[in-house]
Image: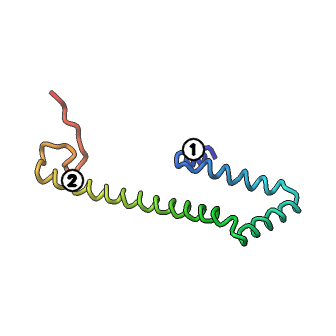
């Protein structure tokens, strides 16, 4: 459990999960008549258009999240590709000068004299 909390905190997902569980806990603790009136008021607000802005905000937030995730993955793939091209170019031009340019074998540190 500790590792899950640390991982979600590192990814920025802990606060939204805690808010969601707090909301669910509040609904579960409510009397059943209040829950049904809450649901009817939410649906009537959506029907009359009063809550369309909130629904749109939720949709836009979800779209932003998936787009940012897609962009991050594309950026990381491009960085890996550029790094491989750089290393290959360095290996061709400066094979014995730059330690990171060696394509095969472990990279060893050269002792400074």
Residue at position x 63%, y 63% from top? 53
Q: Report the quarter where the C terminus lies.
A: top left
Disc 2 to disc 1, C-alpha distance? 35 Å
Outermost residue, bottom side: 47
Kindly state the secondary structure of the residue where label 1 is placed: helix
Q: Say which residue label 2 marks.
A: 86
Q: Nearer the viewer, residue 96 or 9?
A: 9
Rendered residue at 12%/54% (across/down): 92
Q: Nearer the viewer, residue 94 or 61?
A: 61
Mark drawn on residue 6: 1
Mark 2 burial class by Cα count in 10 Å: few <14, some 14-19, many 20+: some
Name the residue furthest top: 113
Q: Kindly indicate whether the residue at mark 1 contacts the one at mark 2 (C-beta within 8 angstroms).
A: no
Which of 32 and 52 lies nearest the eye of the viewer? 52
Q: On the picture, is 17 further left or further right than 66?
A: right
The answer to whether 98 is drawn above or below residue 54 in the figure is above
61 left or right of 74 in image:
right
Q: How many marks?
A: 2
Query: Measured from the top left, where is residue 38 in percent x and y?
Result: 80, 62
Q: What residue do we see at 70% from left, 65% from top?
A: 50
15 left or right, relative to 100:
right
Where does the image place residue 87, in percent across and percent down from the top left?
A: 21, 52
Q: Which mark is residue 61?
A: none
Structural crowding at the residue carrying mark 1, measured as other residues with C-alpha within 10 Å and reported as few (<14), some (14–19) or many (≥20): few
**Residue 83, percent across and down?**
26, 53
Q: Residue at x 74, y 56 (%)?
A: 24
Q: How is the image coloured?
A: rainbow
**Label whose residue precedes the other's in the sequence (2 or 1):** 1
């Amino acid at each position: 459990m500790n590792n899950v909390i640390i991982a979600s905190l590192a990814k920025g997902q802990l606060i939204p999960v805690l808010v969601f569980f707090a909301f669910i806990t509040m609904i579960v603790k409510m009397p059943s008549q209040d829950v049904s009136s809450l649901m009817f008021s939410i649906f009537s607000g959506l029907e009359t258009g009063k809550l369309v802005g909130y629904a749109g905000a939720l949709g836009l937030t979800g779209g932003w999240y998936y787009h940012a995730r897609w962009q991050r993955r594309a950026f990381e793939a491009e960085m890996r590709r550029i790094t491989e091209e750089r290393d290959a170019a360095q290996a061709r031009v400066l094979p014995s000068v730059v330690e990171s340019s060696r394509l095969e074998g472990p990279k060893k540190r050269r002792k400074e004299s």
